[in-house]
Amino acid sequence: MPKSRYRLTNPLRFVIERQFVKGAQYQLMAVVALIGLISFSGGILAKMVAQPEWEFGESVWWAFLRLTDPGYLGDDEGTWLRIISTFLTVSGYVVFLGALVAIMTQWLTSKMRELEQGLTPVAVKNHIVILGWTNRTHSIVVEFFESVGKMKHFLARLGEKKLKLVILAENSSAQLTRNLKADQQIGKRADEIILRTGDPLQMEHLLRVDCYNASAIIIPSYNSKFQDFVSADVETIKTLLSLSSNPKIKEKNQLPYVVAEIQDEKKINVARRAYPGPLEIIAGDSIISRLIAQNVRHVGLSEVYEALLSKGLKSDLYTRNHPALTGKRCDEIERLFPRAIFMGVVRVSEGQFTPILNVSNDFVVQSNDRLVFLAGSHEDTEPAGRSSKPKKLDLQTLHEPGEEHTPVVKMIRLLILGWNNRIPALIHEFGSYIDQEIEVTVVSVLPASDREKKIDLHGGYVNRVACTQVEADYINEAELREVNPGAFDHIILLSTDQLQDTEEADARTIVGKILLDEILDGEQNQPHILVDLANPGNSLLLKKPNTELIISPIILSHLLAQVALRRELQSIYTELFTVGGAEIEFKSIEHYGLGPGNYTFEEVEQVTALVGETAIGVFKNKKNGHLKNKLILNPPKNEYLTITENDEFVVLMTY
C-alpha cells in the first residue's frame, strides 16, 4: 500500500481546521489574525518598494485602511503603491467582507436554528407541563383552551392570570409551531404554547421545562405494540423516577403534582412506588375497556360519556367547596342551584378522595365535602334561590325505593373484530357483571397463541365469559361472512395497535365497517355496532344509525386535562366507569309510571328521586333508531319537555 506524501503545510492546515470547528468566535479570531498578517505584510512591502520614508506603524496602518475600505484606492500615487493598494483592496473584499459576512451569517443561522429547537430553559412558574408529544397531546391542549371556567379558577388558586403551557417534545421544530397555528381549534393561541425539545427520560431535559416550579405535569402515553420490549408504561415509570430522583428536588423539598397515563392497570402500584409525590394515574386500557363494556350493557351510553368528557353545552362536571352549605340536606341544596344538577359529593380525608354520588334526600353535607355538579359553567354552581317547589305528580304505578328485584341473567353474543392490548382488560371487565353471561368471538390475523398468551398475562379468562379465538382477516369479505356477523347481539370493531400509524389502523377499521354493513344489509337481526377509532378526524366517516363511536385518544386526553385542573375529578370518573356503585343508565318513562306528555325537568327530578335515582338528562327517540335522536343533559328545569314513548331518561343510580 503506497504511503501518503507528507507535506509541510499539513500541520498548519490541521491546526487551522481545529480552530474553525470550535465555533464562530474562533473563526472570527482566525479572520482577525489573517487581516493582521495581510496588513503587516502589505505595510512592509509598501515601505520597502514605494515609500521608504514611512514609519513602520504608518505603513501598516496605510495597508489596513486599504484592506478594510476600498474608498482609499484613488488616493495613492505611483505604480508600485497602486499595485500593492489594489492587492490589499481585493483581499479586503475576499477576507474582510466575504469571510466576516459568511461567519456571521453561519453563526446567526445556527443560533436561530438552536432557538427554534427549544433548547433554552424556560423562565416561568406555576405553568402546566406536558411531557411528550403523542396522539393525546393535541387534544389536551384544546381541552385546556376550551375549559375557560375551570382554567380561570385553576389559575386563580395559583394567583396567576394567564395560562402558561410548556410542552417537551422529542422534536419541537418550527414546523410543529406552524401546525399548531394552522389548527382551527388553537389558531393564534399557539403563541401561548412554549415548545421545548427533549426527552422526558433525561433529568437535564426535565430541568429545561422547569418541572419543579410547575403547577401540574401531564405524562401522556402512546400506543405500544405487543412486541415492544420497552412499552409506553415502562417509559412513563422511568419518567416518574427521573422526576422524583432529580437533585433539584433537594432544593424544592416537595414534588410537583403529576397526572400520568398507565395503559396496564397492573403497573399502577409500581408507578406509585416510583413517584412518592402527589400523583393521579389514568389507567388507559382499563378505562376504555370499561366504557366499551358499559356501552354493550347500555346501548347509547357513548354519547353520554362523550358529552361528559368534552367541553359540551351544559354537560361539564364541576366540584366546588361551599363551606356555607355544611350541615345542609341534599333536598335543601338542590333548590339552591336551579341551573345545575347536584350529583353528590367528594369526601376528602387525609389527601384521599372518596366520591359519594346519587345521594338520598336526607344526605347531610360535611365540612370536608366538595359538591359535585353537572352544569354549563362555573357560575352556574354558585348558590341561588329557587322560586317555587316542584308540584306533586299523580303517578299510576311507581316502584318503591329499596324494592328488591330478582336479577335476570342475560346471555349476550359478542363479536370482536380486530385485536389490541385492551381486549384482555375488556374480557376481565365483562366478567365483573353478575347479571350477564357473554360468549365472545375474537377475529384477528394475529396468531391465536399470541392472543391467549396476552390474556393469560392479564389474569386469564373469568367466569361468565366464554371466548373463542378465530384467525381470519375481517377486511376479507369471504372470511368475514364465514363468521356470520348477523348471529351476534353486539359487534365491536377495534383499532389495531399492531400498526404505528393511526391512519392505517383506522383505515382497516373503516373498511371492515363498510364490509360489515354490506353483509348485514337486509338481515332481520341488526346487531348493535361499536367502533373504536384512534384518530378523531375519521369519526365523520362512520356517522350511521345503529353505530356508536369511541375515540380512545380523545377520551383519555380529556381525562388527563380535566384531572390536571381538578384532582378530585379522577375519583368521580373512576366511580362512574367502574361496575358497582354509581352508574349512568337509561330508563323508560313507563318505569316511573309516567305516560307521554309535557313535563318540566324539575318534575322529572322529583320522580326519579322517589326511587333513589338522580336524573341528569333526557335521550329523545332513544327507542326508535329510525328517528333522529338527541341527548339533552341538564336541561332548563322550569321549561316543559315533550316526552314520548320513544324517549328515555338518563339517570344516575346506585347498585
Image (cartoon, rainbow, N blue to C red):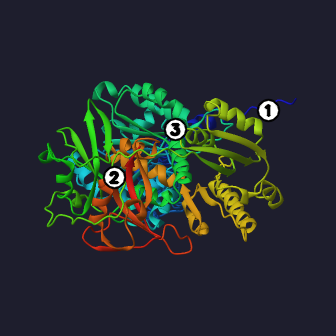
Q: Which residue is mark 2?
A: 611
The residue labelled by disc 1 is 4
Q: 294 and 322: which one is in front?
A: 294
Looking at the image, do the residues carrying marks 3 and 1 touch, with CB atoms under 8 Å apart? no
Q: CA distance from mark 2 to mark 3?
A: 79 Å
User: What is the three-letter code of the residue carrying label 2?
Assistant: Val
Relative to 466, 566 lies left or right: left
Q: Position of residue 105 (x, y in %)?
A: 49, 55
- Mark 1 or mark 2: which is in front? 2
Q: Quadrant of residue 213?
A: top left
Q: Earlier in the sequence, mark 2 or mark 3?
A: 3
Q: For this view, does 308 lie left or right of residue 545? A: left
Q: Earlier in the sequence, mark 1 or mark 2?
A: 1
Residue extending farthest to the right is: 1
Badge 2 marks a residue whose secondary structure is loop
- Where disc 1 sits, the SS reads loop
Give the answer, above or below, for where 538 lies relative to 457: below
